[in-house]
């Protein structure tokens, strides 16, 4: 530390800590994990557990998606591409190599993820030459190209006839549970990856790209490489999600494998929970993913939910432009600051405390990062 | 020996000729001042020297190496860091995260490690402490005042330890006490061999720390010399007042 002594400097003042106590953080994490683990044991109704499976698939997909889109601010609306690649990988591998439909199905998960991740490298390399808004449009276009391929490469994909996957060998009474737990495990891996990315120098590069890509690049951040790696990582998890989805549904069709409403779902979940935060998108997936599936099973027809999505999106953008988690965090920070100011024992004179209340408006008003 | 040289550089924006055949050299190991009236092309010259703008004609040399077509990251990698007149920080990152963006970490392992680890973290904390922003290190950088953002930008360039630092109006919005402190740091870094080019309108600041001052006028070099010489030169005064007159006529 430099031995400087400028009279009006406050170098020794430590920054305000906004972290919750460790015990609270670990306690609540443990509680959530425990709740997710026992969920299918408590709610054994197959309708409910199937809702759980969908929630896990979305949890996995959105957590992966967020590693790229959330952190870098490049909103990908074509990740259904990787969801589809994961589904077709799973279907093709089981049929070509006559993989039995037992637990071996899940051994395909990393394989399907790897295929999606590998596919993401050339695709990302092409798409990531353009900046944010053009990027969004191009991702959608590429997804439809793959849908067309799936329709037309009949000898591989069965075209519009689709492909059937073998029926799992485990007992029908517990059909959903293995899918649920594999989904939970994979989602946990995605979230741990996301957490690690967030604290790594690599992840800091992604966040810098989100704020000012040119400036980041000019400060030595290898922007192209950083974006591409994150894009591929996110594709791995979304691909793996597809490889759970396909055997769970039992069939793969081009229009459902490469489905734009899948991306709409991911985006709404991430924005609702808080784009670019670690747990925001996860929260969004659990809440919205479950609700969506529940409504679907109750009332049928996915189109109803598309309308709900639209309304929800407008509401979120109006009321919580930052999403749930950042909005709560902002309130929390304001409260911590308020408390610090009104507690003389901290030794910080009231008028020298950092003014974080108003400046947060500045951050809020910068709006979405896309 | 000059570290940065521009030769006959021209740059126009539409009808505006920002640089009209500017030739200038900045001495290695010196604190170089670059002054001139508003709109004389100082910032444009910085942009051309750091790869943010391509000149229409002319050359940019870094220690004899042609950098005319170099991109900003190549210029940075060659050891030239710069700050912006209107700061360019990362508004949604925290102050501490900002300082870490420019900290270089080599190799895969460097990328995988926590950004708050290792010697880089010590340097980042030290830089923040130096500019007096430790207290605000967990706040989003967008919430800082203009003066604080200037200091933050200086801090994060410093962390990358470039051999040449181009500062565009570093004193803007910075309080006088901290400004003296900043001047002290510039001198200390300069004593360690860092070359500076400083654009600044605060003449007291410029005359106080610069070894040599170059004057720009209408997109070209007007003169250069010691601070004393520049200060007492009638042509310089004319340039400052003359622009005002022509601006008033326009
Ligand atoms: N991107 C741009 N587009 C159009 N005109 C520009 C651009 N950048 C600079 N100019 C013009 O070029 C001229 C020189 O501008 P420049 O910013 O280099 O001056 P400066 O010496 O830095 O002035 P100041 O002291 O006010 O910062 C001005 O007339 C300005 O209007
Ligand atoms: Mg300028």
Image (cartoon, rainbow, N blue to C red):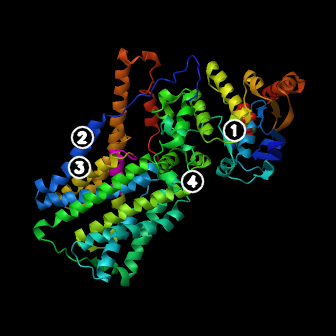
Residue A222 circle label:
4
CA gap between label 1 and label 2 equals: 48 Å
**Sequence-first tag of 4 and 3:** 3
**Disc 1, disc 4: CB below 8 Å?**
no
CA gap between label 4 and label 3 equals: 36 Å
Ligand 2's quadrant: top right
**Sequence-first tag of 4 and 2:** 2
The residue lying at 33 percent from left, 65 percent from top is: A240
Residue A33 circle label:
3
When the figure is inspected, residue B127 is found, relative to residue B208, above or below; the finding is below
**Disc 3, disc 2: CB below 8 Å?**
no
Residue under label 1, please give it.
Answer: B165
**Front of the two marks 1 and 2:** 2
Label 2 crowding class (10 Å Cα cut-off): few <14, some 14-19, many 20+? few
Give x and y (percent) for residue B182.
65, 26
Residue under label 2, please give it.
Answer: A27
Q: Nearer the viewer, residue A264 or A343?
A: A343
Q: What element carries label 1?
A: strand
- Tell whether position B178 is magenta: no
User: Which region shows up in magenta?
Assistant: A264-276
CA gap between label 1 and label 4 equals: 21 Å
**Sequence-first tag of 3 and 2:** 2
**Disc 4, disc 3: CB below 8 Å?**
no
**Disc 1, disc 3: CB below 8 Å?**
no
Q: Is mark 4 on a helix, strand or loop?
A: loop
**Please, what is the dominant secondary structure of the magenta stretch?**
helix
Give x and y (percent) for residue B220.
83, 39
The residue lying at 47 percent from left, 18 percent from top is: A352
Q: Mark 2 lies on which chain?
A: A
Residue B47 circle label:
none
CA gap between label 1 and label 3 equals: 50 Å
């Amino acid at each position: 530390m430099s031995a400087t002594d400028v009279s009006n400097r406050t170098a020794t003042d430590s920054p305000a800590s906004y972290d919750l106590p460790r015990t609270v953080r670990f306690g609540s994490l443990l509680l959530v994990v425990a709740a997710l683990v026992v969920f299918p044991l408590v709610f054994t109704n197959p309708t409910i557990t199937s809702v759980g499976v969908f929630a896990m698939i979305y949890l996995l997909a959105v957590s992966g998606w967020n590693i790229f889109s959330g952190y870098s601010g490049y909103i990908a609306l074509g990740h259904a591409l990787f969801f589809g690649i994961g589904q077709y990988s799973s279907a093709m591998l089981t049929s070509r190599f006559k993989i039995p439909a037992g637990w071996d199905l899940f051994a395909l998960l990393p394989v399907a993820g790897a295929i999606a991740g590998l596919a993401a490298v050339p695709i990302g390399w092409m798409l990531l030459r353009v900046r944010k808004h053009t990027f969004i449009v191009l991702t959608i276009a590429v997804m439809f190209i793959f849908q067309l391929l799936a329709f037309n490469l009949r000898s591989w994909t069965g075209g519009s006839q689709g492909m059937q996957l073998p029926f799992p060998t485990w007992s029908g009474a517990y059909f959903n549970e293995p899918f649920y737990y594999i989904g939970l495990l994979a989602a946990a891996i995605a979230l741990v990856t996301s957490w690690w990315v967030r604290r790594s120098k690599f992840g800091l590069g992604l966040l810098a790209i989100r704020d000012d890509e040119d400036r980041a690049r000019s400060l030595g951040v290898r922007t192209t490489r950083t974006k591409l790696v994150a894009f591929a990582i996110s594709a791995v998890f979304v691909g793996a999600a597809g490889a759970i989805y396909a055997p769970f549904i039992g069939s793969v069709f081009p229009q459902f494998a490469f489905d734009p409403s899948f991306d709409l779902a991911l985006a709404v979940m991430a924005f609702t929970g808080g784009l670019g935060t670690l747990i925001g998108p996860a929260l969004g997936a659990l809440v919205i993913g479950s609700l969506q599936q529940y409504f679907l099973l109750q009332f049928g027809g996915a189109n109803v939910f598309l309308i709900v999505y639209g309304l929800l999106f407008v509401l979120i953008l109006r009321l919580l432009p930052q999403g749930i988690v950042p909005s709560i965090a902002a309130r929390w920070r304001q409260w911590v600051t308020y408390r610090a100011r009104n507690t003389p024992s901290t030794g910080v004179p009231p008028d020298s405390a950092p003014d974080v209340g108003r400046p947060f408006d500045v951050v809020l008003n910068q709006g979405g990062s896309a | 020996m000059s570290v940065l040289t521009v030769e006959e550089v021209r740059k126009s924006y539409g009808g505006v000729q920002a640089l009209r055949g500017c030739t200038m050299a900045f001495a290695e190991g010196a604190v170089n001042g670059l002054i001139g009236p508003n709109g004389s092309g100082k910032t444009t010259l910085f942009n051309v020297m750091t790869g943010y703008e391509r000149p229409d004609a002319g050359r940019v040399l870094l220690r004899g190496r042609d950098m005319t077509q170099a991109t900003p990251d190549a210029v940075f990698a060659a050891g030239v860091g710069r700050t912006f007149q209107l700061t360019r920080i990362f508004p949604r990152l925290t102050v501490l995260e900002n300082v870490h963006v420019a900290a270089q970490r080599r190799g895969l392992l460097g990328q995988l490690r926590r950004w708050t680890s290792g010697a880089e973290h010590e340097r980042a904390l030290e830089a923040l402490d130096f500019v007096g922003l430790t207290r605000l290190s967990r706040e989003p950088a967008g919430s800082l005042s203009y003066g604080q953002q200037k200091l933050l930008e200086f801090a994060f360039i410093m962390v990358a330890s470039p051999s040449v630092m181009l500062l565009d109006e570093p004193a803007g919005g910075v309080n006088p006490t901290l400004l003296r402190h900043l001047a002290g740091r510039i001198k200390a870094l300069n004593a360690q061999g860092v070359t500076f080019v400083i654009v600044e309108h605060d003449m007291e600041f410029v005359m106080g720390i610069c070894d040599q001052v170059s004057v720009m006028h209408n997109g070209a070099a007007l003169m250069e010399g010691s601070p004393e010489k520049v200060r007492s030169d009638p042509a310089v005064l004319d340039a400052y007042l003359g622009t005002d007159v022509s601006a008033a006529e326009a």
